[in-house]
Amino acid sequence: MTWDWSYTLQILPDLMVGVWYTVLITLAASAIALTGGLLLAILESLGADFGRAFVRFWLELARGVPVLVLLYFTFYGLPEMGIVLPAVPIGIGVLGLVYAAYCSEVYRGSLITIPSELRDACVALSLSSLVTWQRVLVPLMIKRALPALLNYVLGMFRETAVLFAIGIPVLMGEAQVAADQSFRYLEPFTLAGLIYIGMNLPFLYFLSRFKVKHA
């Protein structure tokens, strides 16, 4: 099979629609994951035994169950209980909540590295617990965790490919539809791979520069 340039140009607009959905879902899921992960880490640090047990349960559930299983349960299982949600919010929510569990571990690790003397200094300055977290601990947690968090954002970008399983027209999904309709697989999947690489490279360059700058 030879490369068909006319077919390539024909499917390119559909793949661009997939790019739009992929970027949109990645950004929305990242906002949930980064914010939710921070809240989970703080809750685990400050919470009582029940709060900590809840956080640990969610972390193990999110990390132990495949994303595809959670997608199918939410998209196909919940309607049987009378809860019907659109596919895109489901995809964003599942990815965001799953990766919030991973991000919380990163935040928690960065919190552990903060010297206890810093908290003692906050107490000596009569700073309230809220001010200590808001002005001192949280900014340091974010700064120390940022390289690892950006890696998880990149992981979410790649993970969006599985959202085609519930009908969301992400990049991989649009490539699959084009291939199924034409029975030509070389052009759609090659283009999808090249687009993924082209979108990944600037992010990886920024990430490497950030790591060098803050090493």
Image (cartoon, helix red, strand yellow):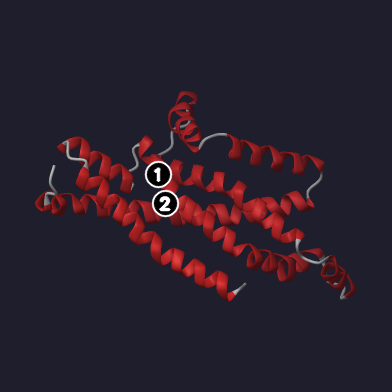
Which residue shows up at 29% across the image and 50% down it?
Answer: 192
Look at 53% across and 60% down and name the residue there: 150
Instruction: Determine the residue located farthest toward the right in the rendered image.
Output: 124
Whichever of callouts 2 and 1 sits on the residue coming sooner in the sequence is 2
Residue 193 location, x and y as percent?
31, 51
Is 41 drawn above or below residue 86 in the view shown? below
Q: Pointer 2 and pointer 1: residues touching (CB < 8 Å)?
A: yes
Which label belongs to residue 88?
1
Count of numbered labels shown in the rendering:
2
- 49 vs 104: above or below: above
Amino acid type assigned to the residue bearing label 2 in the image: Ile
Q: Residues within 10 Å of mark 1 (few under 14, many from 20)?
A: some
Residue at 70% over, 60% down:
110
Q: Is residue 115 visible?
A: yes
* Amino acid type, label 1: Val
- Say which element carries label 1: helix
**Residue at image coords 50%, 66%:** 207
Residue 25: which disc? Answer: 2
Q: Nearer the viewer, mark 2 or mark 1?
A: 2
Residue 3: x, y in percent?
A: 14, 49
